[in-house]
Image (cartoon, grey):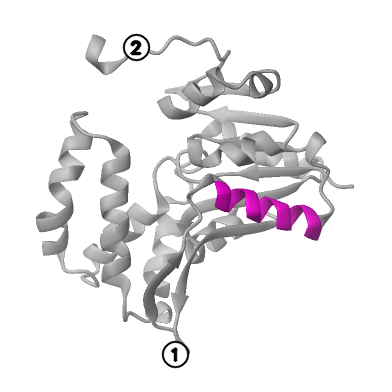
Amino acid sequence: MNIGAFFDIDGTLYRGSLMIQHFKKLIKYEIIDPIVWHNQVKKTYEEWKNRKGLYVDYIEELAQIYIDELKDTKLSDLEFVNNQVINIGGDIVYRYTRSIIDYHLRLNHKVFFISGSPEYLVKKMAEKYNATDYKGSKYILDEKGYFTGKVLKMWKSNNKEEVISSLVNKYNINLDHSFSYGDTEGDLSMLKMVGNPVAFNPNNELITVIKNDENLQQKIKIIVERKDNIYELDYKVKLIETKQV
């Protein structure tokens, strides 16, 4: 059997969101009207940027607008922009996960990218880092290649569980000896399914889940990369709530 290494992308490998970068590039090249940003997204973005709002609120609002704006656009017409996202931003990754991918590849492990970002971007990121296979949110096209506005989302834990199960069968993966890397509760199933899970730069919700799951505590590593340092923590790490600061 083979050993697998399952990676989330946004916030785990990529220091940001592929979808957000794509959205910004679409505005830059005037495929999406800049007024959409100013009228619909800017306020939520500014609240998060100034640490007065939540990232999840910002990303969910932007995701829906992104989906709506792409409807009736032809995917092939976006190829230049899609390439720009990876060519310009594909190296903006964390040192830890970049080196870990290289480590797994040297050991001939199967490397998989599983992300909530659009699959047409995840595909390009997977090619750049020599991943064995990949899965992202599938934006449904009609028979002529135009976006329909329908999306098969890949940012929930149960979605990733289904994908991993299919990859296990396809590549004959031994999950007990495999690895996974994620940063949010959306990666929880991915972390629970393998013998060697790593919570990388985990958010508050994921840390809380770990603290309440004794089985996960026995096997998980918590890794944080900050500036030019990489730390390994344990699940007892103390969280200071915003209301107490």
Residue at the spot 66% in from the left edge and 41% down from the top edge:
101
Give the x, y percent position of residue 73. Answer: 33, 79
Q: Secondary structure at mark 2?
A: loop
Amino acid at pointer 2: Ile
Residue that numbered label 1 is attached to: 144
Does label 2 or label 1 sit earlier along the sequence?
Answer: 1
* Image position of 186 (left or right of 217): left
Would you place residue 193 above or below residue 205 in this image? below
Residue at the spot 73% in from the left edge and 56% down from the top edge:
167
* Image position of 63 (left or right of 228): left
Q: Which mark is residue 38?
A: none
Amino acid at pointer 1: Lys
Instruction: Give the magenta range.
Output: 158-170
The image quadrant that residue 107 belongs to is top right
Residue 238 within the segment the image draws in magenta: no
Q: How many marks?
A: 2
Residue that numbered label 2 is attached to: 240
Q: Secondary structure at mark 1?
A: loop
Q: Can residue 130 be seen here?
A: no
* Image position of 227 (left or right of 210): left
Give the x, y percent position of residue 17. Answer: 39, 48
Extreme-bottom residue of the structure: 144
Q: Nearer the viewer, residue 84 or 12?
A: 12
Residue 163 within the segment the image draws in magenta: yes
Q: Quadrant of the C terminus?
A: top left
